Amino acid sequence: MKNKRIVSGMRPTGKLHLGHFHGVLSNWLELQEEFECFFFAADWHSLTTEYADTSGIRESTREMLLDWLAFGIDPEKSTIFCQSLVPQHAELNLILSMITPVSWLERNPTYKEMQENLQTKDLSTFGFLGYPVLMASDIIVYKAGRVPVGHDQLPHLEITREIARRFNHLYGEVFPEPEALLTETPKVLGLDGRKMSKSYGNAIFLSETADETRKKVMSMVTDVKRPRRTDPGEPDRCVAYSLNSIYLSEEKRTEIVAACRTAQIGCVECKRAQAEALVEFLAPFRAKREELAAHPDRVEAIMDVGSRKAQEEAGKTMREVREAIRF
Ligand code: TRP
Ligand code: SF4
């Protein structure tokens, strides 16, 4: 029998940008049509790095959920919830932490990498080291079969599988080993040509106003080897063009490529057209988001219902876990 259950979480970092849409959300939208999906805001995971200042987490969670819902993550199809409202994740985390060798966590490549990258924060905590155990709990507490993740999360998923295997070996078969559903998406470039990221300040947010979106697109770098309007350009070298694959039809893209390579179109004109296409693409989403934002009670109700459903499913697994460990 095929295990059709999917679990995925996102750390709340606030408003989502085009990189999130292209990399994660569009993928979730497809998955929810075919699988039983559990999507959650991983707010406890935020605590691993934000413990010294937690003031932004609640607001970031709210903003992220608005983006999900507005873009079509659908509470009728998927279970949408907040991790910290489902205490079973924490209970399983505790039990799994007892059977997880510290060496597995210390050799996790993202552990050292993040400690080095975030030098301003003291990440020498127990909780930060144990991040993959919590992530394993998030996944196997639902007995998920598949987990959509990006490349950066593959080591975590491997640890999840090892932990599940170890549990089964020690206490009997309870957990399936979840498989990674690798989301192969080209990386989305930001305004300056680096990877789009909130922390680089180069992102176009999904909830941006039309004017702000236009301004940002117009500021994007184009083919630097095309100094004059009459020089032929190359879209593959153009940062502005790289966004097109997200929201422009194949046909339109072919048109732009041809016009650019033959110098039939100038960059200003080209970007203006691209900006309009992006504004048009985002408009229905923005309208839906604004409507949702005006009804916080509705968003809260969705969260409550989703979290209760998650508790129920996670609760079933935890009864089996307690039985397996003979408590
Ligand atoms: N670690 C993931 C990230 O930083 C977020 C996450 C937490 C997650 N728990 C998860 C993803 C469970 C998939 C499944 O992006
Ligand atoms: Fe980029 Fe368009 Fe200029 Fe070509 S014409 S370099 S695709 S902005």
Image: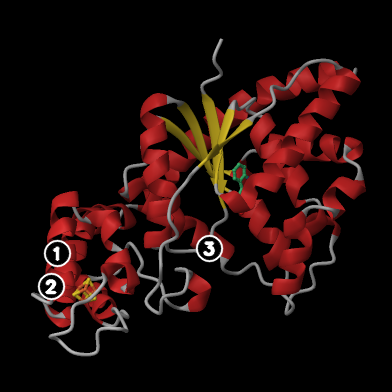
- Asked if ligand 2 lies within 8 A of label 2, the reply is no
Q: Which mark is residue 262?
A: 2
Q: Which mark is residue 258?
A: 1
Location of residue 286 with respect to 115 vertically, above or below: above
Classify mark 2: helix, strand or loop: loop
Location of residue 153 with respect to 241 vertically, above or below: above
Picture residue at 67% right of the left edge, 52% below the top: 44
Q: Is residue 205 visible?
A: yes
Q: Quadrant of residue 47?
A: bottom right
Classify mark 1: helix, strand or loop: helix
Q: Quadrant of residue 124?
A: bottom right
Classify mark 3: helix, strand or loop: loop
- CA–CA distance in space, label 3 to label 1: 39 Å
In the image as oriented, which residue stretches furthest toward the bottom?
A: 228
Q: Are marks 3 and 1 in contact (CB under 8 Å)?
A: no
In the image as oriented, which residue stretches furthest toward the top?
A: 1
Give amino acid for label 2: Thr
Q: Which mark is residue 13?
A: 3
Location of residue 50 with respect to 299 vertically, above or below: below
- CA–CA distance in space, label 3 to label 2: 42 Å
Whichever of callouts 3 and 1 sits on the residue coming sooner in the sequence is: 3
Q: Are marks 2 and 1 in contact (CB under 8 Å)?
A: yes
Q: Nearer the viewer, mark 3 or mark 2?
A: 2
Q: Which mark is residue 105?
A: none
Q: Quadrant of residue 225?
A: bottom left
